[in-house]
Image (cartoon, rainbow, N blue to C red):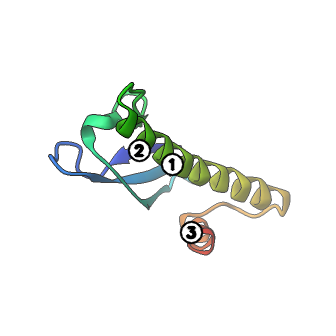
Amino acid sequence: MNFKLKSPHSNNESLIIFYTNLKNGQRFVYSTGEKISPKLWDPLNQYPIRTKVRTDNLKCNAVKSQLERYTKAFREYQAHATSLNESVTKEKTRSYFDQCF
């Protein structure tokens, strides 16, 4: 599970995209709807940076909280599908994410 910016070289805020590779070889990609300035994004860790500037720190923490919701939802869906012995496909995952978010 990873996150990336839709427009990493933009001067304005960019949408954050959630993506992961599924066991069946498919890649699931989903827009989080969250936006952040590329200067506040760590491309290596694929997460908002740590900063001492109060306003930037508040923005980064808010975005981190939202991104954790996507990670948690994917893990929950994966566990639920596994317990039901269902395969995890990008269509089923998208349907689940659409219901959650």
Report the mark closest to the observer, 2 or 3. Answer: 2
Q: Position of residue 65 (x, y in %)?
A: 56, 46
Q: Which of marks 1 and 2 precedes in the sequence?
A: 1
* In this picture, residue 7 sits left or right of residue 57: left
Image coordinates for residue 2, horizontal then vertical, percent: 48, 42
| Residue kind at label 2, given as amino acid type | Lys
In the displayed structure image, the side of residue 7 where residue 87 appears, left or right = right
Assess disc 3: are there few (<14), some (14-19) or many (≥20) residues with their C-alpha within 10 Å of its C-alpha.
Answer: few
Q: CA distance from mark 3 to mark 1?
A: 17 Å
Q: What number is the disc on residue 101? A: 3
| Relative image position of residue 38 (x, y in whole percent) | 26, 41
Which residue in the protein does label 1 denote? 20
Amino acid tagged 1: Thr
- Residue picked out by circle 2: 59
Q: State the separation of the CA atoms marked 2 and 1.
A: 24 Å
Q: Nearer the viewer, residue 36 or 3?
A: 36
Between marks 2 and 3, how big is the CA–CA gap?
Answer: 20 Å
The residue sitting at 85% across, 57% down in the picture is: 83
- Dot 1, crowdedness within 10 Å: few (<14), some or many (≥20)? some
